[in-house]
Image: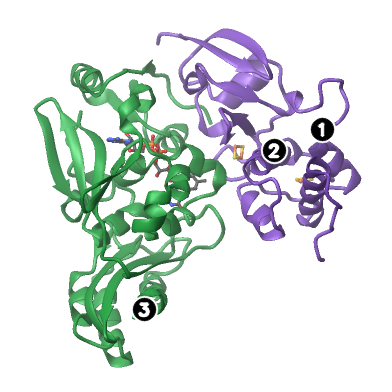
Amino acid sequence: MIPGAFDYHRPATIEDAVTLLASLGEEASILAGGHSLIPLMKTRLASPDHLVDLSGIGNLKGITVAGGDIVIGAMTTQFELIASEDLARHIPIIAETSRLIADPQIRYKGTFGGNVANGDPGNDMPALMMALGATYRVHGPDGGRDVAAREFYHGAYYTALEHGEILTSVRIPVPPAGHGYAYEKLKRKVGDYATAAAAVVITMAGGTCTSASIGLTNVSETPLWASEASALLVGTRLDKPSVDAALAAAEAITNPASDMRGPAEYRTKMAGIMLRRALERARSRTEA
Amino acid sequence: MTKSHIELTINGRTVEALVEPRTLLIHFLREQQNLTGAHIGCDTGHCGACTVDMDDMSVKSCMTFAVQAHGASITTIEGVANADGTLSALQEGFRMMHGLQCGFCTPGMILRAHRLLQENPAPTEDEIRHGISGNLCRCTGYVNIVKSIQYAAAKINGTPFQEAAE
Ligand SMILES: Cc1cc2nc3c(=O)[nH]c(=O)nc-3n(C[C@H](O)[C@H](O)[C@H](O)COP(=O)(O)OP(=O)(O)OC[C@H]3O[C@@H](n4cnc5c(N)ncnc54)[C@H](O)[C@@H]3O)c2cc1C
Ligand code: FES
Ligand code: FES
């Protein structure tokens, strides 16, 4: 499988990349790790005339703690997310999710920015970013702007990014110390996208849930933030009737395709099961 | 489309070449550099037969353009033997523990195991299995591959070799 021909560009700064993308027009694509784009190019589902490789831009990489937030550069790889001590201390669910993405080789090259910008509902990071309330920083010809992860995903491969815009970093509010978290993913094998997956971040006080946020992966055209299901848990003791009610609310917003991962009804149910397991594990991880 | 000039190090040797940007690294290595050790198994990023070491990362060379390797340092199976031509610890491990049958997956397995042992010199069986989870073998059932890597780790560390439980 040989991709179509293209011209290759490796700009050294964000400004150069933005200018280049503006002058090359619609037939130019951004290249990060290439591990979502190259498969599409091999099957000719994508055949850009130009690739603008971001790997020569030094300041797009890195993880920094900034006040109550963590900022992750777009070109930070999934391998680097797993290795980060700052993330392990403050937002351990990011490494937990990264370990369930693809396999070791893909994680060395695949970038965080590529994973969230790609717009494939099978990507694992977007639902997690919605659950964590992350904000994406985007740069284009008209300067910079911020887009909330919860507003970013409009359809399969259709996001709030305008052509020529580059996602440069993601800002994530650090959840309170002692929060519970879990990412549960059902997949057929290593390197498979989710049949269904759920991200959960909760806080508890005296056995009562004080906040909850739930994201769902690959059970709709877009990643989902299950706001109603999340709200149903707050103020409860996460007893079975409350969890059942949240599961029903989460399942109700899914709209998966029937495909080789299973019929739609099954995938909806699996989203519920993943959510139940994630809630149990998140609760067991809360302190007090 | 314009060809790109690339310069990189392959198995310690500096290489300059003109490549079409769409040339995949695996095709560049096999067809332009005559390094046919890395194999094409699936061509979709799943099997790991095309794994090479690139700037201290295990990389699937069927999922990478040669232009992305500009400036990089690459090791392929042709570059892993000891300088005097004897087998490296991993190569010896695969030989002694019967870590291969048809051998198709072996160059990728060895390059992946090489990076794994650099990062984690004394991995547990579980860590080995997770570490090679991006490499498929249709023949061995993995048991002897795990043993081969344990053999190599023990040899490098100078510790007694303990076989994986069967
Ligand atoms: C075998 C295999 C299994 C996989 N399994 C999983 C899995 O289980 N879960 C999962 O989540 N992913 C999986 N992936 C995908 C992998 O995680 C990708 O690396 C990731 O989705 C995209 O990151 P990338 O850096 O490779 O992006 P690229 O492929 O380079 O880019 C992807 C898309 O995003 C755009 N883009 C990239 N960076 C930016 C940016 N900074 N600003 C704007 N646009 C940008 C590109 O133009 C392109 O359209 C798998 C891939 C393979 C090959
Ligand atoms: S040929 Fe590259 S992963 Fe299979
Ligand atoms: S030895 Fe035949 S595929 Fe592994």
Residue A23, how many percent across, how many down? 19, 16
Q: Which element type, helix, strand or loop, lies under badge 1?
A: loop
The green chain is A
* Residue at mark 1: chain: B
* Residue A138 sits in quarter: top left
Q: Are marks 2 and 3 on the same chain?
A: no
Q: Is residue A138 in sight in this rendering?
A: yes
Do labels 1 and 3 touch, CB within 8 Å? no
Dot 1, crowdedness within 10 Å: few (<14), some or many (≥20)?
some
Ligand 2 falls in which quarter? top right
x 25%, y 35%: residue: A168
- Label 1: which residue? B88
Residues at discs 2 and 1 both on one chain: yes
Q: Amino acid at mark 1?
A: Ser
Mark 2, Cα crowd under 10 Å, few <14 / some 14-19 / many 20+, is many
Q: Secondary structure at mark 2?
A: helix
Residue that badge 2 annotates: B114
Image location (x, y in percent) of residue B20: 48, 14
Residue bearing the label numbered 3: A283
Amino acid identity at mark 3 = Arg
Amino acid type of the residue tagged 2 in the rendering: His
